[in-house]
Every structure is written in C-alpha cells, then in structure tokens.
Amino acid sequence: PKPTTAPAPFTAKAPSVPVGLTQPVGQDRTIPLKGVSKAMVKIMTAALKIPPFGYYDDVDVTQLVSLRKNLKVVAEQRGIQLTYMPIFIKAASLALLQYPVLNSSLDEACENLTYKACHNIGVAMDTPEGLLVPSVKNVQNLSIFDIAAELNRLQALGLAGKLGTAELSGTTFSLSNIGSIGGTYARPVIMPPNVAIGAIGKIQVLPRFDEKGEIKKAHIMNVSWTADHRVIDGATMARFSNLWKQYLEDPTTFILSLK
Ligand code: CAO
C-alpha cells in the first residue's frame, strides 16, 4: 500500500485588518429614553417577574389562505382591508370562551385572579413611534368584518402617531404578528396584568404529506404562546392552542361558533 502523507498544516494567515476600520467613525451618542421607549422599559421590566411557560405549534392554514383570498375581495368592495389578523383574533376570542382563564388578570400582590368579561385583544403594532399595543375591544361581540374595520382604524391611528389611552388601555389578551414583517418564530413577552400572549410567524409554503402519504403543497404558520405559569398550566395552554388551531385549519368550524 502507498504510504499516506499527513495533510499539510493550515498555514493561511488571517487577512490583515485595513487600518482605517479600526478607527472610530464618529462620536458616541447618548439619548434620554422618553415616551414609548420609556414605557417599554417599565412594562418589560415588570414582565420579567412572570415565570413564562412557552408552547409552540405549527398550523396548516392552507384552507384559510384560499378562503381569505375570496373574502379579501368582498371586504375591499366594502372599503376594508382584510388581512389574516381579524380571523386570528376572532378565533382566539372563540377559544377564550372555552378557556376563560387565559383572559384573566392577576393582581400585583398575586392574591386575586379576575376573569375579564370583555375580550379586548391587543395587537402588537410596529409604529413610527415604536412598539405599541392597541386593542380591539369586545371581540366576543364582533364579526370578523367588524374586527377588520377596527384594525384598519387602529393601524391608521398608529401610523399617524395618534393612538391614545382609549386604544392603548384595557387589553386582556394579545397577539403579535411578527410574520407580517417576515419572521418565522418569536417568543412573545406577556404584558402584566395579562396572563397570556401569542406570536404568529410568516405563512410559508412547505411540503406536507396527505392522508395517502403523498407530498402536497401546504401553507404552514408557526404560533408561539407564552403564559404566566403562576396561574396557567401547560395543559390549559395546549388545549386552548389546539382549539384556536382547529378553527384556523378548518375555518368551516367557525360557522358553528359564530353568533
Ligand atoms: N404571513 C403571511 N402574510 C402575512 C402575515 C403572515 N403572518 N401577516 C400579514 N401578512 C400579509 C397580510 O395579509 C397583508 O397582505 P395582503 O395585502 O395580501 O392582505 C400584508 O402581509 C400586510 O399586512 P399588514 O401588516 O398591513 O396587516 P396585518 O393585519 O397582518 O398586521 C399589524 C397588522 C399591526 C400586526 C402589523 O402591521 C404589525 O405591526 N406587525 C408587527 C408586530 C410586531 O412588531 N411584533 C413584535 C412585537 S414585540 O416587539
């Protein structure tokens, strides 16, 4: 057999750093935190006290994608932009009717849990001022079309920097659609005194198996729930998520629950 030779040691030198890049290009800048940025520090610091339980799942929204395509045209004729969010919000409200503890509020002393009568669903909104969470109020009484109209109004106010206390207070449960920007996964942070929040990723076209074992094209979306583990157990979070997922995977099941 031929004698084997050991590979030559790696001798390549790291490229030298161009001299100019080691020099600072400007001066450090310190700005005071005000307004939305300051409020975010306060809320997120309070949120750190919550022991979070994370629950993640995939949702096959193939049927919903084609349904929304048709409904979007109808809504447009009535002057409303219908995205997926109003459907996600209504499905969450219907699931909250079955699992009301997820729409509860824990007092600061952690001695009382209040089951909130209204489903005021907060929507994390990326605005020119920063992260704001206005809520769609009384979703339990609204149709998907009503929710879409209200979301259009809130988005317009957010863009104009005109969201006020009426829109920003009273949230009982939240959804954050990071997928509208592009992310697939996110771990949302609960806003106290709420006890749960969900983050939704971008809908992706991915291969899945059908019942015959054949590959089919599917629209898949990831959801990540964070719950306050002091008052919500994992099984409740999972059951709520399963119901929300069922509404979205088979949107005809909505019809049975809509009032
Ligand atoms: N997957 C695929 N497409 C999506 C999508 C998703 N998850 N979410 C939105 N889209 C689509 C919409 O359907 C719409 O397309 P059409 O024109 O075909 O209807 C388009 O993307 C734009 O939607 P939108 O962003 O204007 O509206 P929305 O109702 O989906 O979302 C809002 C509204 C306020 C949630 C969103 O604009 C936003 O601000 N997202 C960022 C939230 C955020 O910052 N989260 C982090 C919080 S923690 O810092």
Image (cartoon, helix red, strand yellow):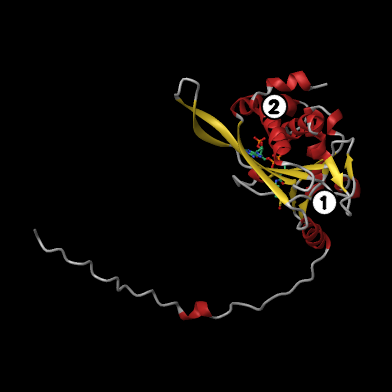
Return the residue found at the far left: 1
Q: Which mark is residue 192?
A: 1
- Secondary-structure class at tag 1: loop
Q: How many labels does the image show?
A: 2
Residue 36 falls in image quadrant: bottom right
Rendered view: 16 above or below 132: below
The amino acid marked with disc number 2 is Tyr
User: Relative to the observer, which residue lies in front, 98 or 35?
Assistant: 98
The quadrant where ligand 1 appears is top right
Residue 231 falls in image quadrant: top right
Q: In this view, does 24 lie to the left or right of 107?
A: left
Q: In this view, does 63 lie to the left or right of 75?
A: left
Rendering coords of residue 100 (x, y %): 82, 34
Q: Which residue does the numbered mark 2 point to in the structure image?
A: 247
Rendering coords of residue 54 (x, y %): 67, 46
Within-10-Å neighbours for mark 1: few <14, some 14–19, many 20+: many
Q: Earlier in the sequence, mark 1 or mark 2?
A: 1
Q: Nearer the viewer, mark 1 or mark 2?
A: 1
The amino acid marked with disc number 1 is Pro
Quarter occupied by the N terminus = bottom left
- Secondary-structure class at tag 2: helix
Rendering coords of residue 163 (x, y %): 85, 49
